[in-house]
Image (cartoon, rainbow, N blue to C red):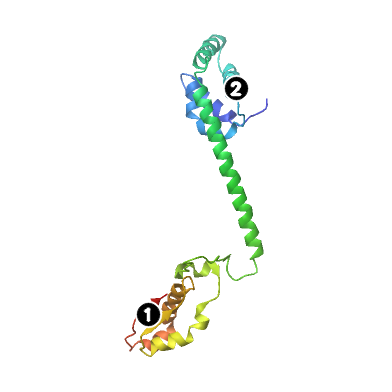
Amino acid sequence: MVKYQGYFALISYLRSQAKWSFRGFLVLYRELIVSSSSSKDWRELNKTWIDRFLGAAKKLSDKKIFADLTKKVKSESKGHRLKPYWKGVITEHKTEFKKRKQENKENIDSEGRRKSTKRLPYPSIRSWATNGIISPDQRDKYYYADPAKTNTELLNSILEGKFVALHGPRSSGKTTRVYRIMQQLTEPQVEQMSLSQNLPGIFLAN
């Protein structure tokens, strides 16, 4: 017998439940049924799972129990009684399919970015945008122009006790540069130079 998705869950249900109910099984294993149901026809889904339910139950019950169960299942699924359930399953499956498709696309795009940047010293490239600040806890995640290399004059002015005003256009990296300066000020070689100095603040202006 071909083992379909949900087969072992169905067998587990029948073996663990004293009273069998097709509707009860559908409710209990809705998530599994959503993930395994690709048809857009609720009648087809209904018939497929009734056949599976009764097929598995027949192997685990005697003729009298099976006959009673068959009548019960027919009653539970009569007419359009389960239509709302199956319509919901179809909608949820469609949503999940779109979600998985988007996740797969993102994974493929991410893998492509990793391959294109594998020679860089950092795992990602920061795409600069307005107010694209890189905070200290993000520095080891991005490859970007390190402002520490151009901070010498600014750092010296601070160490000399001068009031520093850092001007620049919007989204020019001022905040990221200040974060870098603050980190440089705590580095051992700089910290020794500034122990006895009362360092002023840094003023940012657009």
Counting labels gives: 2
Picture disc at residue 52: 2
- 29 or 153: nearer the viewer: 153
The residue under label 1 is which amino acid type? Ile
Secondary structure at badge 2 equals helix
The residue under label 2 is which amino acid type? Arg
Picture disc at residue 113: none
- 7 or 202: nearer the viewer: 202
Residue 109 percent location from the top left of the image? 62, 55
From the viewer's perspective, tell me whether residue 198 is left or right of residue 9: left
Task: Tell me where residue 64 sits by quadrant.
Answer: top right
Picture disc at residue 202: 1
Residue 184 percent location from the top left of the image? 44, 80
From the viewer's perspective, tell me whether residue 165 is left or right of residue 51: left
Can residue 189 be seen at all in this image of the molecule? no
Crowd band around label 1 with a 10 angstrom C-alpha radius: few (<14), some (14–19), many (20+):
some
Assign the C terminus to one quadrant of the image.
bottom left
Separation of disc 2 and disc 1 at Cα? 72 Å
Assign the N terminus to one quadrant of the image.
top right
Residue at 64% in and 53% down? 108
Can residue 72 be seen at all in this image of the molecule? yes
When the figure is inspected, residue 26 is found, relative to residue 58, above or below; the finding is below
Task: Tell me where residue 144 sits by quadrant.
Answer: bottom right
